[in-house]
């Protein structure tokens, strides 16, 4: 296995992992499968692109992407979670609402911006790094570094901050959290803003390699779902392990079999893992909390 | 004005279909004078064609029949319109869109057996249809299978597929399973696009046998044949849906859907029931797949796209997944928007999405659940109003009324309360002054009413005047109400005359009345 495969596996794992952790966190704390995450991804790509028309400063562009993603997340939570969370059949209904949002939103994006793809400016420069025979491009290195930093910050924040405690209380037991004074709606809006921002970050990072388009969210959404499913919905560590596994599968398949077989091997991986562990890799947590 | 027509007019009694209070309108049928009612049944079964309940009408003093389930009538009307309308209008495009609608309806009917009746969110319906369509089209092209055999092959493929997707459903939780089946659809699409056998180069497989004769294809007659065949397919799907959902299997599945533990404790083997419904539904979907291939003379990867799946999902979400009429209505709405109003362009997707959003946000079980939801909402509101009404008067709330054995007591309390409210208004300083001046009468009307009320109160805790020294010292006591238990002295005031003592009793009673 060459270093190149390891490297590209990690860079894919970094971006998809961000999206997957968003899906996973939303599921664990709100009990809602957010299928509008792909739409949030596309919106933040356009947000960053709009900002890049004003200034190409990397921080401003990334900030615009994050802000657009967070706003989109808040809108989704206001439509899908707040009106429905205490209604019967919440899980399926919220899933349908997020699906409808993504359907409508993607179409509106296409009408407003047109079907052409948009490029983002190179935020990490054009540098290349030579490492024991492998060429490390700056966009992929930047993606890995930024994603790792953000994930580490997220984990620490969840451990020490008051908001993080609220979030973890919601993940363990929403009713119990409500009983001790955690506002379910406020926390939900906050979680969705946060996971939206994560999707925005993933969008900006992936747009370093690919382009921004209305449908650009579909593929990452599928990957994010695969990783979240594989890692066990609700488990961050499981999602990280799953992201690396999926990244490796993708890089290896693309190298040995060809890019068109990527989805097949990934789903085969998911099916095999889920047959043996029906709640995913990190699903142990679910079993204990029951 | 003595024309023959007016002379035959008789005064008709008010029709019995008029609403009484909030009762729902129910059509009633007169029973023959001899009181005999023939309940017609489907041949060779005990199933009734129309469910009639016999009732006694206390107003007309007659026995009458009430149709307790009107749905079969609506179904006959709707199916009649579907069968006759497009075939007689003779519009090729209408027939083509109608055929799409009928095929999708059949797919959705099979699908909601799993999603609605069994309550398992499986998104693999199109994967089964597509796999069956591809297999039968391929066999027809390469081995020359005729179209009836294509349906059989499709059913077989569906059965195998159903067994495969039923295995993970036993172990996995709802959302995990939904995602897995979504992945399965994607897997099928990618495989079909890549595979040379299944026409990756030509964008699908074409050239299979069809039940539309080759000479009639793309003519009005050909469309009509396709439409009629699809209508038969819909009827078959409805029959299968009815046979599963309306019989024992459906009942078992619905119990297991609500609460697995309860089903298990009642001795219901829901696992085998779920396996059965997966096999039946997938076999049905497979036959539809074979039909699809025979109708289109082939299959294309479009069957597996996520967009197509979303469209189907929108259909059952809008119509409601719990009932056959919901699935058909949802299919009708979405097909109409998507296939008939093609001129609207990309706006169609937005409209379907908005419909989906609104229905999900406001309706609990799709469009066909709205009626039940509205009835429940109205009942909740009227019960709230009733509780509010009762509480404001503070007499007896509904819960308390259950505990009171003597129901007359409830009415008496209500009367007593109203009377006290009325008497409170009568009490004025002038009235008290009138009593002080003349405790023994003669009294005004108001004072007499107040005193009558006081006299009627129960003996327990009733005030009385106790003579300590005749014509010199009187005190006020309160009766115990229990024989043998002496009255107790209320306070230590001693009144010099009987009139003064009587007025003191009156003042105490007035205070109690005003305080109640």
Image: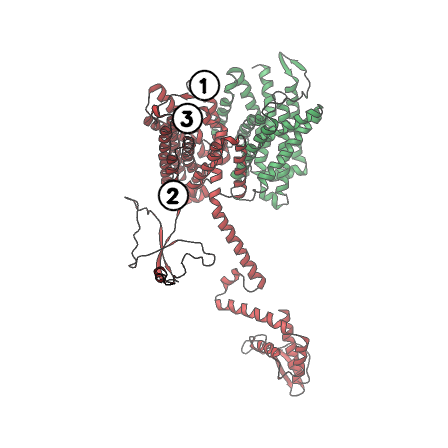
Chain colours: A green, B red
**The one of B510 and B148 positioned closer to us in this rendering:** B148
Please give left or right for residue A191 compared with residue B215 in the image: right
Q: What is the residue that sits farthest to the top in this orientation?
A: A133
> Callout 2: 10 Å neighbours few (<14), some, many (20+)?
few
Q: Do the residues labelled 1 and 3 touch (CB within 8 Å)?
A: no
Instruction: Name above or below for residue B322 compared with residue B437.
Output: above
Q: Which residue is drawn at 49% across and 39% down?
A: B318
Residue A119, horizontal then vertical, whole percent? 63, 21
What residue would you read off at disc 1?
B200
Q: Where is residue A129 in the image (x, y as percent from the top left)?
A: 66, 14
- On the image, which quarter does residue B108 sit in? top left
Q: Name the residue under label 3.
A: B131
Visible residue check, residue B429: yes
- From the viewer's side, name the closer residue of B130 and B12: B12
Between the C-alphas of marks 1 and 2, the distance is 45 Å
Badge nearest the viewer, 1 or 2:
2
Looking at marks 1 and 2 on the same chain, the residue that comes earlier in the sequence is marked by: 2
Question: Which label number is shown at residue B160?
Answer: none
Element under label 2?
A: helix
User: Which residue was labeled with disc 2?
Assistant: B77
> What subunit carries mark 1?
B
Check the image and report above or below for B200 versus A102: above
Q: Mark 2 lies on which chain?
A: B
Instruction: Tell me what residue is drawn at x 47 percent, y 40 percent.
Output: B319
Q: How crowded is mark 1: few (under 14 residues within 10 Å), some or many (20 or more)?
A: some
Q: Which of marks 2 and 3 is in front?
A: 2
């Amino acid at each position: 296995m060459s270093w190149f495969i390891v490297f590209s596996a990690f860079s894919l794992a970094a971006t998809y992992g961000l999206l997957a952790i968003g899906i996973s966190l939303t599921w664990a704390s709100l009990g809602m499968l957010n299928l509008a995450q792909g739409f949030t991804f596309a919106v933040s790509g356009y947000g960053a692109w709009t900002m890049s028309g004003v200034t190409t400063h990397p921080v401003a562009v990334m900030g615009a992407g994050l802000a657009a993603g967070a706003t989109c997340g808040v809108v989704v939570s206001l439509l899908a979670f707040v009106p429905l969370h205490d209604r019967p059949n919440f899980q399926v209904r919220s899933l349908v609402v997020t699906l409808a949002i993504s359907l409508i939103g993607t179409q509106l994006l296409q009408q407003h911006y047109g079907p052409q793809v948009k490029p983002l400016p190179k935020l990490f420069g054009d540098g290349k790094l030579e490492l024991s025979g492998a060429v490390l491009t700056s966009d992929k290195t930047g993606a890995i570094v930024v994603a790792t930093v953000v994930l580490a910050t997220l984990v620490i924040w969840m451990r020490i901050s008051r908001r993080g405690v609220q979030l973890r209380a919601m993940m363990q037991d929403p009713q119990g959290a409500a009983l001790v004074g955690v506002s379910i709606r406020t926390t939900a809006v906050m979680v969705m803003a946060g996971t939206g921002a994560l999707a925005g970050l993933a969008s900006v990072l992936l747009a370093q390699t690919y382009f921004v388009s209305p449908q650009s969210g579909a593929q990452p959404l599928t990957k994010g779902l695969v990783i979240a499913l594989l890692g066990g919905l609700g488990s961050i560590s499981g999602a990280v392990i799953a992201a690396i596994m999926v990244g490796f599968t993708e890089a290896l398949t693309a190298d040995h079999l060809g890019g068109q077989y990527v989805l097949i091997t990934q789903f085969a991986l998911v099916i095999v893992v889920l047959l043996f562990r029906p709640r995913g890799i990190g699903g142990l947590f679910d079993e204990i909390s029951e | 004005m003595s024309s023959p027509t007016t002379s035959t007019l008789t005064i008709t009694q008010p029709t019995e279909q008029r609403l009484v209070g909030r009762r729902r309108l129910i059509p009633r049928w007169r029973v023959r004078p001899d009181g005999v009612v023939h309940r017609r049944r489907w041949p060779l079964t005990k199933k009734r064609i129309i469910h009639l309940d016999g009732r006694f009408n206390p107003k007309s003093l007659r026995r009458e029949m009430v149709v307790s389930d009107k749905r079969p009538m609506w179904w006959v009307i709707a199916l009649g319109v579907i069968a006759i309308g497009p075939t007689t209008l003779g519009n090729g495009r209408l027939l083509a869109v109608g055929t799409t609608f009928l095929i999708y309806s059949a797919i959705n009917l099979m699908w909601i057996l799993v999603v609605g009746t069994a309550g398992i969110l499986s998104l693999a319906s199109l994967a089964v249809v597509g796999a069956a369509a591809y297999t039968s089209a391929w066999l027809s092209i390469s081995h020359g299978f005729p179209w009836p055999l294509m349906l059989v092959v499709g059913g077989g493929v569906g059965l195998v597929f159903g067994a495969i997707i039923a295995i993970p459903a036993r172990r996995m939780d709802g959302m995990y399973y939904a995602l897995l089946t979504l992945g399965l659809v994607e897997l099928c699409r990618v495989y079909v696009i890549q595979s040379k056998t299944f026409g990756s180069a030509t964008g699908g497989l074409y050239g299979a046998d069809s039940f539309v004769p080759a000479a009639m294809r793309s003519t009005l007659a050909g469309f009509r044949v396709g439409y009629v065949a699809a209508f038969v397919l819909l009827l078959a799907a409805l029959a299968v849906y009815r046979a599963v959902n309306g019989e024992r299997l459906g009942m078992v599945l619905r119990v297991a859907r609500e609460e697995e533990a309860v089903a298990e404790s009642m001795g219901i083997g829901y696992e085998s029931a779920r396996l059965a419904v997966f096999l039946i539904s997938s076999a049905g979907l497979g036959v539809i797949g074979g039909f699809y291939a025979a109708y289109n003379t082939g299959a294309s990867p479009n069957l597996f796209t996520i967009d197509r799946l979303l469209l189907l999902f929108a259909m059952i979400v809008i119509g409601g997944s719990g009932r056959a009429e919901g699935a058909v209505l949802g299919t009708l709405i979405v097909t109409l928007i998507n296939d008939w109003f093609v001129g609207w362009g990309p706006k169609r997707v937005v409209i379907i999405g908005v419909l989906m959003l609104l229905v999900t946000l406001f309706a609990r079980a799709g469009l066909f659940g709205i009626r039940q939801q509205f009835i429940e909402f109205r009942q909740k509101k009227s019960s709230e109003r009733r509780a509010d009404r009762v509480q404001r008067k503070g007499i007896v709330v509904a819960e308390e009324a259950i505990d009171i054995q003597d129901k007359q007591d409830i009415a008496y309390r209500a009367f007593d309360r109203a009377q006290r409210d009325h008497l409170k208004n009568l009490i004025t300083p002038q009235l008290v002054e009138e009593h002080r001046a003349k405790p023994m009468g003669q009294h005004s009307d108001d004072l007499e009413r107040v005193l009558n009320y006081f006299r009627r109160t129960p003996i327990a805790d009733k005030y009385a005047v106790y003579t300590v020294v005749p014509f010199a010292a009187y005190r006020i006591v309160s009766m115990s109400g229990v024989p043998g238990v002496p009255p107790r002295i209320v306070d230590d005031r001693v009144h010099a005359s009987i009139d003064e003592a009587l007025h003191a009793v009156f003042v105490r009673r007035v205070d109690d009345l005003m305080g109640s």
